[in-house]
Image (tube, coloured by chain):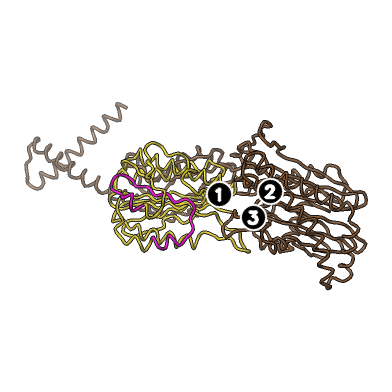
Amino acid sequence: MDENNSEKEIQNREMSCLIKEKLNSFGTSISPEMFEEFINFSVEKLWVSYTQNWQEKESSIQDKMNALDISFPNGTTNKEYAQSFIIDDDEFERIEFEGLENVGLQFLKDEAANAFTIKGTPTIAGDFDIKMKCYYRGWIPGKNILERVFHIAVNPDPRSLWKNIPTSSEIEYYKPDSESFLLSVENEKNVVVASQRGRSHAHEGKARDDDFKIEYTDSKWYLTAVADGAGSAKYSRKGSQIACETVINHCKEALKDSTMFEEFIKFYNDDAENPTNRKYVGDNLWNIVGNAAFKAHRAIKDEATLKGAQLKDYATTLLLTICKKFEFGWFIASFWVGDGAICIYDKSSHRINLMGTPDGGEYAGQTRFLTMPEIFSDTASLYGRLKFAIVEDFTSLFLMSDGVSDPMFETDANLNKVEMWDKLWENLNHEIDFSNNNEQINEKLLSWLDFWSSGNHDDRTIAILY
Amino acid sequence: MRRLPVYILLDTSGSMYGEPIEAVKNGVQVLVSTLRTDPYALETAFLSIITFDSSAKQITPLTELSSFQQPNITANGCTALGEALALLANRVDAEVTKSTMEKKGDWKPLVFIMTDGEPTDDLNAGLAEFKKRKFGMVVACAAGQGANTETLKKITECVVQLDTADSATIKSFFKWVSASVSAGSMKVEDAGTEMTSMSELPPPPPEVNIVV
C-alpha cells in the first residue's frame, strides 16, 4: 500500500513538473501560488463539464429505458408464468432484475439474441414490485445503475378461495348438502340422480336449494322430478322439495290405473295425425302432469301460509317427466317451468328431443318459477309447458337444473345442438360406466357433479333415465 | 359465463390534481387487489375505468379482474361528466352482452361515479343516453364540497358525499366500492339476482355520507 502511494506521489510530482515546464515554455513565469490556483480552477471546471457530460448521457439512456415496451401480465398462483421481451439496443450492456425471488420467478437471458424471459411458477398471491437494473455501455463503478420499477400482480387460484362449510342441521327445513339415488329396474332402463350443493353455498355454509324425486310405479311408469329453488328466496330449499314430492305423489296416484290413458296413447301412436287422438292424450296429460304442477303450487302456498311467509320465499323451478315403455316404443311426457333442461337423447340415431324451452330473460337471472301465480293464470302458456313424444328408443333422458345446463351448454341455443349433448354424454361416460349395473353409479354421478367451471357455482342436480 | 360488469367513472379534472388524484390511483389499486382475494368477484366481476376531464376516455376497457392492470391516471382540464355518461352508454352497448337464444347475457352493470365539481359540458345530452340503458346499482359520489349533489341526483338516487377529498377519505370510499362489488358478485352468484336498492349495499364508512 505504502509503496503504491509513494509511487503515485512520484507520478503526481512528475505531472506537476511537466505542466510547469509547459507553462514556462510559453515564456510565462508562474509563482507556485498561482500554479496551485490554476490547477484548482482547471480541475473544477473540467469536473463540472465531465459530470454534466456523463449525467446527460445517463439521463438519455434512462429515457430510453423507460420507453422500452415491456409489461408484465398478471400471474396466478401455481400456474406457470412466462413473459419474454427483446431489448435490441447495445447501449443496455447488462440487464438484471431485483425482487423476482419474492414472486417465485427467475430471469433468463439469451445475450446473443438480446432475448430476455421472466419465468417460473408463482406460489404466493399478491402485488409485487420488481426492479429492472441496467448497466449501460461505458458504465464504471461510481456511476449510477439505472433502474425501472415494474408491478406484477399474482392472483390467487380461485379454487383455493372457496371454503366448504357444512350446513348446520339446526336450520329450518334442513336438507343434506348432497344426495344421490339409483333406481334400478330389472331388465329395463334405470334412473340415476345426483344433487350437489353449489360452491357458493358451500362457501357460506348455506343449504342446497335443489331437490329431486324419482319413482317407478306398479303400473311401470317412470316418474322423475327435479326442482331448483331460487337462490334469492329464503325458503326455496323447501319449495323445491315440496314441488318434487307433490308432483310425484300426484302422478303416482293418477297413474295407478292408467289403462285408459295407455289406450289413448296407443291410438295416438297408430294415428298421430288425427287431432282427436292427440287431444285425448293431451287432456289426460293435463289431468296428470298439469294438475300435479298446480297441486305443487298449492302445496307450497299452504306451507307459506302456515309459516306466515310469502309464496315467493319458496320460489322454485320444476322439471317433471313421466315415461313408460310400450311395445311400439317409449312414451315420454314432461312439464317444464323455469331454467334447466329436459331432453331425450339418442346416440345411435344422433337425435335429440328438447322437451320445451327454458324460461330466460333479457339479462341473465330472470327466470320463471312454479310459485308465480301467472304460470297458471294463462292456460295457453300453461299448455305450452306440457310436451309429449313417442320415440322408438333412446340412450338417455336427461333432467337437469341450470347448475348443470349453464356450464355444459352456456346458451339456450346450444341446448338444441345434438353435438353438445354428444359431448355431455361422452363427458359422463368418461367417468361413469352406464352399461354396468353398478350399485355405486349414483356416487360416481355425484362426484362427477363436482366438475370445475369458472363462475358457475350454483347447486347442481341431474337425473338420467338410461 | 355471466359476467358482472363494473364501470368506474372518475373525475380527472384539474381540481383533482395532487393529493386527490394520487388517492384515486391508490384507491383503484386497493380496489383491485382486494377484489382479487374474493372468490365471487374474482370469477364474476369485470372492471372498466372511464376518466373524464376536458373529454371522456375509457382508459381500461371491461377487463377480467385477474388480468386488470393499473392504468395511468393524471389530472388536468375541466369536467366533461355529460360526455362520460354518453361514453358509458356507448361502451355498455359494445361490451355488455344481453341474453338471447344464442347467448346467455351478462348481469346488469354496476356503476360508480366520482366527481369533485360541477359538470362543465352539457350534462343532459349524456344523461339522456345513459337513461336509455339498463343498469344495476348506480352510485354517484360527490368528493368534497365542490360537487353538487343535486346534479348527481339527476343521474341516480344513490348519491353519497365525502366531506373532503383527502387521501384517507377517498381511500375509504374505494374500500366501500370494493365491498359493494363483492356484495354484488356474491348476490348474483349465490342468489342469481342483482342488487336493486341502496339498502343492499354494505353500510358506508363514516367518511361516506348518504345524501337523502
Label 2: which residue?
A: A228
- Name which residue type carries label 1: Thr
Residue occupied by mark 1:
B44
Q: Where the N terminus of chain A falls, by quadrant?
A: top left
Q: In this orientation, does residue B13 appear?
A: yes
Q: Position of residue A110 (x, y in %)?
A: 51, 50
Residue A119 is at least partly visible in this image:
no
Q: Which mark is residue B71?
A: none
Chain ID, mark 1:
B
- Is A163 included in the stretch rendered in magenta? no
Kind of residue sitting beneath label 2: Asp
Q: CA distance from mark 1 to mark 3?
A: 23 Å
Q: Are marks 3 and 2 on the same chain?
A: yes
Figure disc tally:
3
Q: Nearer the viewer, mark 1 or mark 3?
A: 3
Q: Position of residue A269 (x, y in %)?
A: 87, 67
Which residue range is magenta in the image?
Answer: B127-152
Nearer mark to the viewer, of 1 and 2:
2
User: What letter labels the chain drawn in yellow?
Assistant: B
Chain A visual colour: brown
Relative image position of residue A335 (x, y in whole percent)? 75, 57
Give percent across and percent down for residue A4. 30, 30
Q: Nearer the viewer, residue A313 or A163?
A: A313
Q: CA distance from mark 3 to mark 2?
A: 11 Å
Parent chain of label 2: A
Contact? badges 1 and 3 (CB < 8 Å): no
Chain for disc number 3 = A
Query: B125 or A77, which is in the foreground?
Result: B125
Circle 3 is placed at which residue position? A368
